[in-house]
Image: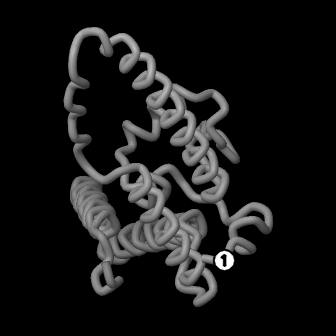
Amino acid sequence: MSSALLSDGQGPPVTKRELTKFLGVSRTTLDAWIDRWPEFPIRERGSHGRGYKFDLREVCAFLRARQQEDADRRAERDEQLAQILLPFGPEPERPVSPGPSLDDQIKAMKLNEMRLAQAQRARQLVRAEDVRELFSHIWSESTRAMQAFVDQLAREQAWPAAILADRKQRLAEMQAETVRQAREFLRKPSEGNGK
């Protein structure tokens, strides 16, 4: 990704879910960072059913700065430790850190930024909020129409109240199962996305 693309203002907002996926960290880790660093760059705090929003570029820059601060602190601590250990013998072996290094994580973040920018240019991204709003509208209209149909059918066929109540209960159960299946489908990673 070009540096001009990274430096030309704010990018599109991302949610906590998108940010954790992009960074390759858990939601718990992201929440811990937000709690640990009051200055963590949050574009919009979530509340009352609205999710958090972040600017990916700001978060990446912030994490790079934290990485540099951590590296400086480690170097200072290692230097102090080396001065203390000099009289006592050879330098102890340093433990090998598990997992990818912070540099590798930053490289992966840059690659993901490039993929995100490419997907935006190709208009392959859809705002989750817009999709949620559309599904909510379609679902409420569909539910209202189905309930009206059951009521009309009950009137036309003179169903007793107990049968009408049973049919409405069955309709509600089918709708709940449909919602469960839709949510399960949306949680699955998309297939054929090259990952």
In which quadrant is the C terminus drawn?
bottom left
As displayed, is residue 34 above or below residue 63? above
Q: Residue at x 26, y 63 (%)?
A: 184
Is 181 situated above or below 78? below
Corner quadrant of residue 104: bottom left
Q: Quadrant of residue 181?
A: bottom left
The kind of residue tagged 1 is: Ser
User: Is 112 left, or right, of 60 in this rendering?
Assistant: left
Give whichever of 64, 35 is nearer the camera. Answer: 64
What residue is rendered at 35% in x and 45% in y?
26
Which residue, given by chain and number where applicable, does mark 1 sit on? 2
* Quadrant where the image shows the N terminus: bottom right
Q: Quadrant of residue 185?
A: bottom left
- Where residue 106 appears, as percent x and y from the top left, is 47, 58
* Residue extending furthest toward the bottom: 122
Disc 1 is placed on an element classified as: loop
Residue 53, percent across and down? 62, 50
Residue 159 appears in the picture as rendered:
no
Taking depth in this image into account, of 133 and 27 the one nearest to the observer is: 27
Q: Is residue 104 left or right of residue 54?
A: left
Q: Nearer the viewer, residue 111 or 102?
A: 102
In the rendered view, tell whether residue 177 sits above or below residue 54: below
Direction from residue 31 to residue 51 in the image, left or right: right
